[in-house]
């Protein structure tokens, strides 16, 4: 007597994600359409085999397109989206789906870094631009924090001054590296740190760095190199310099204030509210 074969069990979302997350074209398009904040999809009340995408923002909901229902089912099956209960439940991306979008946002070069880091490109143009995690900057950390008076620890001028020095330090290649820089430019087989092969951009950046450090003074230049060059946090600066707790915050604000003055950055905009129109063409 033949035994009754067990019926096929539907794979749970987590199991489906482990089996594979390959998506067809329609599912990929739906995944991208659900990426913006507040985006969701719901069944078309007229055509049951279709989904309607809505994108909400500032209290306004706009259309985001129509997609096959099977595309939404595929996203749910591979654990990239979740559906609210009920026949008219909305379909929205979950954390896994948003992580997949972030991986795809920066191309194939760093697919898994982009999902957890705040990557930005800087330094030149095209594919040679360096990747940087914007969230690792201690200046950005201080700019997000507020003091007891409710004001940010750093004003906009100080933040821009610190970021400008950091960009110049990176472009000048003045900081030691702990490993090989495989992405650096090579000229006639020489390394980029060879003075004979240094480009005009590198030499200009070094000149700007020296001028900025000389302007703030010897007592604060080392602190700015640690903060803007090596990206050391306030606690590490206090530990290495044996400063009292929470004292680095005050000294950093003074150092960045001097740096902002060197760059000509003002904390408050000044000048007339209006100016007369000026024409660059020669008068008749």
Image (cartoon, rainbow, N blue to C red):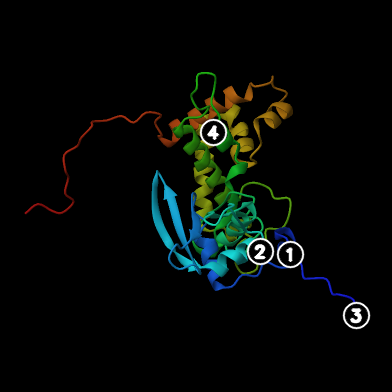
Q: Secondary structure at mark 3?
A: loop
Considering every residue shown, the one lying at the far bottom of the view is 1
Which numbered mark, 2 or 4, is in the foreground of this view? Answer: 2
The reply to whether dot 3 and dot 2 touch (C-beta < 8 Å) is: no
- Residue corresponding to mark 4: 144
Q: Would you say residue 62 is visible in this rendering?
A: yes
Can you say which quadrant of the picture contains the C terminus? bottom left
- Residue corresponding to mark 2: 77
Q: Residue at 64%, 36% (x, y): give it.
A: 226
Q: Earlier in the sequence, mark 2 or mark 4?
A: 2
Gap in Å between the C-alphas at discs 3 and 4? 69 Å
Q: Dot 2, how many residues are within 10 Å of its Cα: few (below 14), some (14-19), or many (20+)?
A: many
Considering every residue shown, the one lying at the far right of the view is 1
Which numbered mark, 4 or 1, is in the foreground of this view? Answer: 1
Gap in Å between the C-alphas at discs 4 and 1? 44 Å
Q: Quadrant of residue 278?
A: top left
- Residue corresponding to mark 1: 11
- Residue corresponding to mark 3: 2
């Amino acid at each position: 007597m033949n035994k009754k074969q067990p019926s096929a069990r539907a794979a749970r979302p987590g199991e489906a994600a482990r089996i594979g997350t390959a998506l067809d074209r329609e599912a990929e398009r739906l995944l991208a359409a659900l990426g913006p904040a507040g985006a969701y999809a719901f069944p078309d009340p007229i055509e049951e085999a279709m989904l309607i995408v809505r994108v909400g923002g500032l209290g306004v909901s706009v259309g985001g397109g129509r997609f096959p229902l099977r595309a939404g089912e595929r996203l749910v099956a591979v654990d990239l989206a979740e559906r609210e209960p009920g026949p008219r439940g909305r379909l929205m991306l979950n954390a896994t789906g948003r992580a997949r979008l972030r991986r795809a946002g920066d191309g194939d070069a760093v697919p898994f870094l982009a999902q957890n880091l705040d990557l930005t490109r800087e330094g030149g143009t095209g594919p040679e631009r360096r990747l940087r995690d914007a969230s690792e900057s201690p200046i950005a950390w201080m700019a997000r924090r507020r003091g007891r008076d409710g004001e940010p620890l750093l004003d906009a001028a100080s933040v821009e001054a610190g970021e400008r020095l950091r960009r110049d330090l990176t472009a000048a290649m003045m900081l030691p590296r702990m490993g090989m820089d495989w992405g650096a430019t090579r000229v006639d087989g020489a390394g980029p740190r060879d003075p004979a092969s240094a480009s005009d951009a590198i030499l200009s950046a070094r000149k700007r760095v020296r001028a900025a450090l000389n302007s703030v003074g010897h007592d604060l230049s080392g602190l700015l190199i640690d903060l803007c060059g090596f990206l050391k946090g306030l606690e590490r600066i206090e530990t290495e310099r044996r400063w009292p707790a929470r004292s680095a915050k005050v000294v950093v604000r003074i150092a960045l204030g001097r740096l902002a003055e060197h760059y000509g950055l003002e904390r408050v905009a000044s000048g007339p509210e209006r100016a007369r129109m000026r024409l660059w063409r020669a008068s008749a």
